[in-house]
Image (cartoon, rainbow, N blue to C red):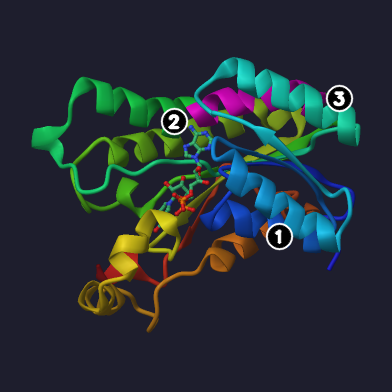
Amino acid sequence: MDRLKDKVIVVTGAAMGQGAEEVRLFVEEGARVIAGDVATEALERVAAEVNALHPGHVLPVKLDVSNGEDWDALVAAGAAQFGKIDGLMNNAGIGTKGVFWEETSYELFKRVIDVNLWGQFRGIQAVVPEMRKCGGGSIVCVSSLAAFVGVGFNAYSPSKGGVRSLSRTASVTLGPENIRVNTIVPGTIETPMTAAMFGDSEIVRRCTAQNSLPRLGRPRDIAYGAVYLLSDEASYVTGTELVIDGGQRFKG
Ligand SMILES: NC(=O)c1ccc[n+]([C@@H]2O[C@H](COP(=O)([O-])OP(=O)(O)OC[C@H]3O[C@@H](n4cnc5c(N)ncnc54)[C@H](O)[C@@H]3O)[C@@H](O)[C@H]2O)c1
C-alpha cells in the first residue's frame, strides 16, 4: 500500500490486458491515474470499476497514442484534473497476429511502428513539460522479449527493439532533469493480445516448457514491476531493462 502515494501517472492502453491491471494496482498503491486508450467503452468500464472503490482516482481519456493532438489533449486534461503529472506508463501496443515477413506490407509495418514506437516517443514528448514542473518524474516503456530473441520476423520485433533504444536514449537525455526512463520486457503474458494462444492447451504447454518457471505470465506480474520503477524506491534506477518472463529468454 501507498508505494505510489501522491503520484499522478498516465497509463496508455489502459482499457484491457496489462494496462487495465496497471490502473488497478497503481490506484491500490495510492496513485491517481490518467487512463488513455482507443477502446473507449472498455476504458470507461475499467475507470468505473476502480472509481467505485476509489472515487475520483481514474480519469479516462480517449487516446490514440499515434496521434499527437490526442496526447496534448490528454496531458492538458490530466494536469487540469489532478494538478500535475509525474509518471508515464508507455504500455499501449499492437501485435501482428501471425503475419510474417513475406506478407508484411509497408502500410502494416508503418502502422505498427506508429503505435508501438512513435506512440511511446510522442508520449515522452507530451509529458516531459509537466514532469519538469514537478522537478522530475518516472517513465516506463514497454518492450518485449521479441526484441531480444527471434520469435517471429515481422514488424513487431523491430518496433519493440526501437523501444529499447528510445528508452535508453531518453534516460541519458532526461537524467539531468531527474526524469528516469526504464524499460519493462514482458515474456508471454495472458491478455487479450495473446488470448488465441492461451485458448489452445497444446500451445500453452509448449510455451510453458520454454520457461524456467512452471507457468506463463499474468498482467499483475508486469504491474508489480512497473510499481517499483514508478515509485521512489527506484529513485537511483534509470536506463535499465527489467525482464519479466519466467526465465523464457534463457531457455526459449
Ligand atoms: N501479452 C504479451 O504476451 C506481451 C508480451 C510482450 C510485450 N507485450 C507488450 O505489452 C503491452 C501490453 O500488451 P497487452 O498484452 O496487454 O495487449 P492487449 O492487446 O491485451 O491490450 C493493449 C491495449 O492497448 C490499446 N491500444 C491499441 N492500440 C492503441 C492506440 N493506438 N492508442 C491507444 N491504445 C491502444 C488496446 O485497445 C488495448 O486496450 C504492449 O505494448 C505489448 O506489445 C505483451
Residue 167 percent across, percent down from the top left: 52, 36
Query: Along the line of sight, which residue is nearer the eye, 19 or 227?
Result: 19
Q: Secondary structure at mark 1?
A: helix
* The furthest residue to the left: 102
* The furthest residue to the top: 69
Give the residue at mark 1.
Answer: 24
Which span is picked out in magenta? 119-132
When the figure is inspected, residue 55 is found, relative to residue 190, above or below; the finding is above
Mark 2 CB near ligand 1 (8 Å cut): yes
Q: Is residue 84 magenta?
A: no
Give the residue at mark 3.
Answer: 133
Query: Label 3: few (<14), some or many (≥20) within 10 Å?
Result: few
Q: Secondary structure at mark 3?
A: helix
Give the residue at mark 2.
Answer: 115
Residue 75 percent across, percent down from the top left: 74, 26
Q: Which residue corresponds to the image point at 23% horizontal and 72% vertical from the top-left?
A: 203
Q: Secondary structure at mark 2?
A: helix
Query: Along the line of sight, which residue is nearer the eye, 229 or 15?
Result: 15
Q: CA distance from mark 1 to mark 3?
A: 26 Å
Q: Earlier in the sequence, mark 3 or mark 2?
A: 2
Query: Along the line of sight, which residue is nearer the eye, 51 or 150?
Result: 51
